[in-house]
Amino acid sequence: MTSANEAATDLLAPGGKREAPALVVDHLTKRFGPRVAFSDVSFDVAYGEVFGFLGPNGAGKTTTVRTLGTLIAPTSGRASVAGIPLTPRNGQQIRARISIMPESPGLYLRLTVAENLRCFAGLYELADAGGRIERALKAVNLTERANDPCGSLSKGLRQRVALARAILNEPAVLFLDEPTSGLDPVAAREVHELITSLRARGVTIFLTTHRLEEAERLCDRVAILNTTLRLIGRPDELREQLFTRNLEVRTHAPLPDPGRVFAGLKDVESWQQTPSGSYLLAVTDPDAAAPGVARALVGSDADVLSIAESRHSLEDVYLELIDEDVEAKRR
Ligand SMILES: Nc1ncnc2c1ncn2[C@@H]1O[C@H](COP(=O)(O)OP(=O)(O)O)[C@@H](O)[C@H]1O
Ligand SMILES: [Mg+2]
């Protein structure tokens, strides 16, 4: 019999490092009748990565998670999940290696935290349920609350119970669908810390979110989805791909003739004065441009306060890419 564990071991190289990516998604499309949930999506996720799947409401994030999590079948395209090809026959084997934390936790509110976990461990037919529950509760810092009814817990704590449930089967790939949606900043921060600690334990995390700062803070790479994949890369790469880079020059007093200082510099493509009185210079390479800018300013007797690269936030990138409202266009 080929067990899920054997399939996983096949992926281990001699040093214990996994060779194949945790997720391979190849031209995947899901339609519901005439409605396209996501279309022609391709990307890979490496083992150990925290991969952010960022997009507005209706972008297709949850449908992607449900598809990769074997809950619904794709319309076309191919994928492999935890090294196993995504086919109806492999569903059970894949599900043994992954876990999904859905948008709403779906806990039994009249049961205690431990009873909920026991119930799900039974449902998944997990061996050593007691040990697993103890480890999961410890991982999410809920050991003390094991005997409290879930109905008595705050939304943030319920989310932690849901996370404990999601790690009961010690998944190689963990799908978290908007894990901090509706949480207050303190509870959201706690979930972030838990994600970081799971990552430190080597769990591959596929995190959907519509929150930019969450993607930027937690993720090694981010894909921006709006039915189709718009962009993929490290948060800092995304900014650089899309925007010219800038040097911001601050001076003690306004320059009498800024054009004369900046216009002749070969690394400076254009310049403008900002409303706050600083100067923003468009450059291709800030490191190459900065020394020449500094010399020119000193040569014109300017009192320079600072010359620094000014970075666009990921929010700029995001808003640029999702300015069309796909959901509103569908009917
Ligand atoms: N079961 C379904 N039947 C029909 N349409 C669906 C179904 N599930 C999702 N959709 C549609 O697919 C699109 C993507 O939805 P979803 O994946 O939930 O987006 P997101 O999670 O990014 O908000 C939406 O237009 C949604 O209405
Ligand atoms: Mg969703």
Image: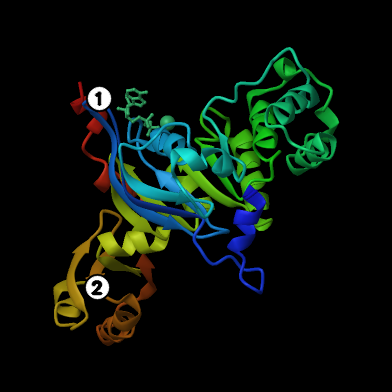
Mark 2: secondary structure: strand
Quadrant that contains the C terminus: top left
- Residue 191 visible to an observer of this rendering: yes
- Name the residue type under label 1: Gly
Residue 105 numbered mark, or none: none
Q: Residue at x 18, y 27 (%)?
A: 329
**Quadrant housing residue 238:** bottom left
Looking at the rendering, the quadrant in which ligand 2 lies is: top left
Along the viewing direction, whichever of 127 and 241 lies nearer the viewer = 127
Q: Residue at x 54, y 67 (%)?
A: 19
Mark 1 crowd level (few <14, some 14–19, many ≥20, 10 Å Cα): few
Residue 31 position within the rendered picture, expressed as x and y whole percent measured from the top left: 28, 32
Disc 1 residue lies near ligand 1 with CB under 8 A? yes
Q: Are marks 2 and 1 in contact (CB under 8 Å)?
A: no
Residue 13 position within the rendered picture, expressed as x and y whole percent measured from the top left: 61, 71
Indicate whether 59 appears above or below 195.
Answer: above
Q: Residue at x 68, y 17 (%)?
A: 108
Q: Earlier in the sequence, mark 2 or mark 1?
A: 1
Q: Nearer the viewer, mark 2 or mark 1?
A: 1
Mark 1: secondary structure: loop
Mark 2–mark 1 distance (CA, rounded to whole Å): 48 Å
Label 2: which residue? 283
Label 1: which residue? 33
Along the viewing direction, whichever of 272 and 43 lies nearer the viewer = 43
Indicate whether 112 appears above or below 312.
Answer: above
Disc 2 residue lies near ligand 1 with CB under 8 A? no
- Residue 254 visible to an observer of this rendering: no
Residue 115 position within the rendered picture, expressed as x and y whole percent measured from the top left: 78, 22
- Name the residue type under label 2: Val
